[in-house]
Structure formats: structure tokens, C-alpha cells
Image: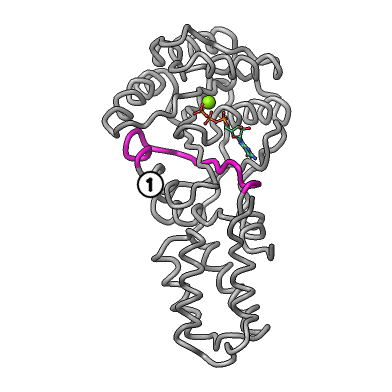
Amino acid sequence: MRRFALGARIRDLFGAPNHGAPKHSFFDELEDILIEGDIGPTTAAHIVEAARAGIRGGGGKDRDRFFELLRSELGQALRAESLHLLDNTVNLHLVLGVNGVGKTTTIAKLAEYYRRKQGKRVLLAAADTFRAAAIDQLAVWGNRLDVPVIRQAAGADPGAVVFDAISSAQANRIDLVIVDTAGRMHTKAHLVKELGKIDKIAGSRIPQSAYKKILVIDATTGQNALRQAEVFHGAVGVDSLILAKYDSTAKGGIVVAICKALEIPFSFVGVGEKLEDLEPFDTELYLNRLLEAR
Ligand SMILES: Nc1nc2c(ncn2[C@@H]2O[C@H](COP(=O)(O)OP(=O)(O)OP(=O)(O)O)[C@@H](O)[C@H]2O)c(=O)[nH]1
Ligand SMILES: [Mg+2]
């Protein structure tokens, strides 16, 4: 399923014949590859500009120099920050994202992570009330994880589910409430209205530093993911990003573009469909995957 391997494309370009001398088309091609890699046109242009200064184009030595430059430039744009839970209070993660990006699966992975790795008491809130199947899916995960799930009937007010979940968490000394939300995004006004209500309820009952709005990004969607991040950030403000499905694509360059454009850090990366397939976002590991030769 890997459609585009940034590292391999660049290696091919440097390895191609007739690139012994600095050629206009060589750098153009390099820029095209970087842009197709979704890292963003500004970053791509900046990197090519820097490369023109020190790289003649072609040859193993130049290739190695370019990869060093690329790593350093991308590394500077990237932001990684883990999600720390506060002690002795209810923390809340509001998990956002468009349809099918991997929200519910990521929530299950987060619950497993905090419960198993950190010994936290976790509760899930089924605030994606739009579809009965979405509520059931979260309930199935809750059962498997042995974590309580607060739910209401399909069509119920998501804000009411969040209100209930917080009350239950406060009464039961829960450390972390993770809220599943519907991924519909008909219009921005609609999104602001729907999520705004939930945000207001959570924001008024959870201390600010214990409340995180987390956007899940699907690594396979490319440029559209930046657009999604802009819309959600504009609607409710996003504190942290999770990159899902990084195992399914080599097109993870969008992470660079999002970090650069919105200055929001990534906290985790999803690398499979199983519960344990969630890793804290690590800049070095991410760059290794992005730039490896495949
Ligand atoms: N390979 C892979 N698949 C993933 C990952 N995360 C989620 N998926 C799969 O992506 C599909 C959608 O995941 P969901 O968690 O249901 O996504 P969602 O955002 O909750 O979807 P809706 O509730 O319909 O909006 C499922 O088949 C998941 O197994 C991942 O990190 N890697
Ligand atoms: Mg879901």
C-alpha cells in the first residue's frame, strides 16, 4: 500500500545518471519530490534553496550531505510533546477528527496506554452519538479493555454524554476521561456549533491544564490533512495531534507541513490496528521512517 517513498525517490534522483553537474532540472525535480512528499511548498523551497548552496547534484557524497540537510531542516519544523496527566484531578482528552481517520481505535489504544503503562484509571465517553454503531464500537473496546463506557441512546446530545462522563469520573476517582466524537464536517459553522457545545461543558468542568483537544490525522490522506487541521483548530483549538495509520503509507510528510503551519505538537503515532500499535511521537523515529529507502 506504500504509494510514495520520499527517501527512495530522493535516493533515485541522486543515483540517476547525468546528474554529475549542477543542473536546473535536478533541483526542480528535487523540489517536486519534496512537494509531492507533502512537507509543504514553503519548506520544500527553503530546503532546495539551502541545497543549491552546498550541493552539486548527484553522487553518493552529495546525497549524504543532502539527507543531512533534509533531516536537520525537517527536524527543526517538527514539534513533539507528550500528553502529561495531572495527578489528583480528572483529566479529559477530547478526541477529534473527520470520518474514518482512526479516532475510536486511537481512543482504545490511548486507554490501553494510560492504563497499562501508567496505571491510570480511565473512562470512555461515547459522544459520537450520531450512529448507534459508533456507540457500540466504543462499548466493545470498553469491554475488551475492562474500562467503563458512559453512553446514551443514539441521537442523544453529545454534550450531555460528556457532562455525565465527567460527573461519573469525579465520583469514581477516574484519572482520565477520553471522549469519542462524531467526525462529520458538513460545514465549518456546523462543526463549531457541535464541538463548541462539548468544549464549553468540558472546559467549564475540567481545569485547563488537564483538558486536551486532540486531533487525529490519517497519514494516508496527504494534503487534505492540513486542511482538516486548520478547520478543527479554527473551530475549537487543537492542543495536540496524533498521526494514525503511519504503517499504511510512506506519505507522512504532512506532519511537517502541519507543524510548520499551525505550530501544534504531535503526541502519538498509530502504527497498526492492534491495541499496542501506538507509540509516543518521536522526531528521530518519524524521520527515519519518512526518509528510509523503500
Ligand atoms: N493500519 C492501521 N489502521 C488503523 C490505524 N488506526 C485505525 N485504523 C483502522 O482505520 C479504520 C477506521 O478506524 P476507526 O477508529 O473506526 O475510525 P473513526 O475515526 O473512529 O471512524 P468514524 O467513527 O467512522 O468516524 C479501522 O479499520 C481501524 O482498524 C492505524 O494506526 N493503522
Ligand atoms: Mg469512530
Segment colored magenta: 231-248
Label 1 within 8 A of ligand 1 by Cβ: no
Name which residue type carries label 1: Arg
Question: Within 10 Å of the Cα at label 1, are there few (<14), some (14-19), or many (20+) other Cα atoms?
Answer: few
x and y percentages locating residue 142 in the rendered image: 64, 16
Residue found 58% across the figure and 64% down from its top: 6
Judging by the rendered image, the residue that carries numbered circle 1 is 227
Residue found 68% across the figure and 83% down from its top: 60
x and y percentages locating residue 68 in the rendered image: 61, 73
In this view, the residue farthest toward the bottom is 21
The image quadrant that residue 171 belongs to is top right
Q: Quadrant of ligand 1?
A: top right
Query: In the structure shown, which secondary structural element does the residue marked by tag 1 occupy?
Result: helix
The colour style of the image is: one colour
As displayed, is residue 47 above or below residue 228?
Answer: below
In this view, the residue farthest toward the left is 189
Of 259 and 25, nearer the camera is: 25
Q: Is residue 139 one of those drawn in magenta?
A: no
Of 256 and 203, nearer the camera is: 256
Q: Is residue 34 left or right of residue 193?
A: right
Image mark count: 1
x and y percentages locating residue 154 in the rendered image: 46, 10
- Quadrant, the C terminus: bottom right
x and y percentages locating residue 111 in the rendered image: 64, 26
Q: Is residue 25 left or right of residue 148?
A: left
Q: Is residue 151 left or right of residue 144?
A: left
Residue found 60% across the figure and 69% down from its top: 9
Q: Is residue 19 left or right of residue 42?
A: right
Of 213 and 153, nearer the camera is: 153
